[in-house]
Image (cartoon, rainbow, N blue to C red):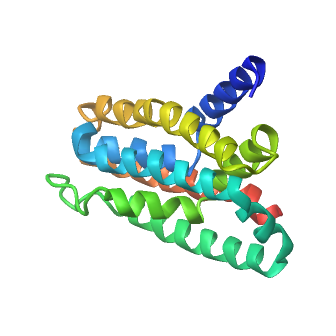
Amino acid sequence: MTYDLFIGLLGFAFVTSVTPGPNNMMLLASGVNFGLRRSLPHMLGISLGHSLMVFLVGLGLAGVIHSAPQALIVLKLASVSYMLWLAWKIAHSAAPKGAQVGGKPFSFLQAAAFQWVNPKAWAMALGATSAYAPEGTVQAAALVALVFACVNFPSVSVWAAMGEGLRGWLAVPARLRAFNWTMAALLVASLLPVLRL
């Protein structure tokens, strides 16, 4: 890979990792509800789970998905269903009296598995491998996955840190409830591009 192409890949990985999407909306909510330290497995699961996805897509999974239109429909239905369920969980994560937050943060494995039903993660993986590893070699796929692993973690950590920074302001139960409902609505809104396809 040339230097210019590598710089382009770094930029692509950063922009797609740091911009709003399902992972970052959930990390913002997790930072508010559970804090940065308790959200760490969630952040690592996103970064490493997505990197594995990028690697496998780079090795040829993209071709399999594109050759089976039924697989795309099933993937879309699973993604939408799971993300609607997550939105409901986020909206209801504040305890009724506001003293305690219900639920618990995503585990490493839950966050890693979520990448497979996250439409933005699929778009990132397919876009990166198409543009930066079109030859489909193990080395090219591994390099793209490694860049994503290195760039993604600090990018998504910003969202959980912002959430933790809001914890004091959101200590008021009504504010926390409104925040959680807003995050749930934004997560649902992130599905609109998927539903149009």
Q: Where is residue 160 drawn, in percent x and y?
A: 37, 37
**Identity of the residue furthest to the left in this view:** 99
The answer to whether 175 is drawn above or below residue 122 in the figure is above
Q: Nearer the viewer, residue 78 or 52?
A: 52
Q: Where is residue 118 drawn, in percent x and y?
A: 59, 59
The answer to whether 168 is drawn above or below residue 177 in the figure is above
Q: Where is residue 47 drawn, in percent x and y?
A: 46, 45
Q: Nearer the viewer, residue 84 or 176?
A: 84
Q: How many marks?
A: 0
The answer to whether 190 is drawn above or below residue 155 in the figure is below
Say left or right for 93 vs 113.
left
Can I make out residue 70 in this image?
yes
Query: Toward which corner of the image does residue 139 lie, by quadrant?
Result: top right
Say left or right for 33 vs 86.
left
Say left or right for 54 vs 37.
right
Q: Residue at x 21, y 55 (%)?
A: 101
Which quarter of the image is occupied by the C terminus? bottom right
The answer to whether 168 is drawn above or below residue 39 in the figure is above
Can I make out residue 190 in this image?
no
Q: Where is residue 133 drawn, in percent x and y?
A: 75, 42
Which quarter of the image is occupied by the N terminus? top right
Q: Residue at x 64, y 30 (%)?
A: 15
Q: Residue at x 62, y 69 (%)?
A: 80
Q: Residue at x 54, y 48 (%)?
A: 51
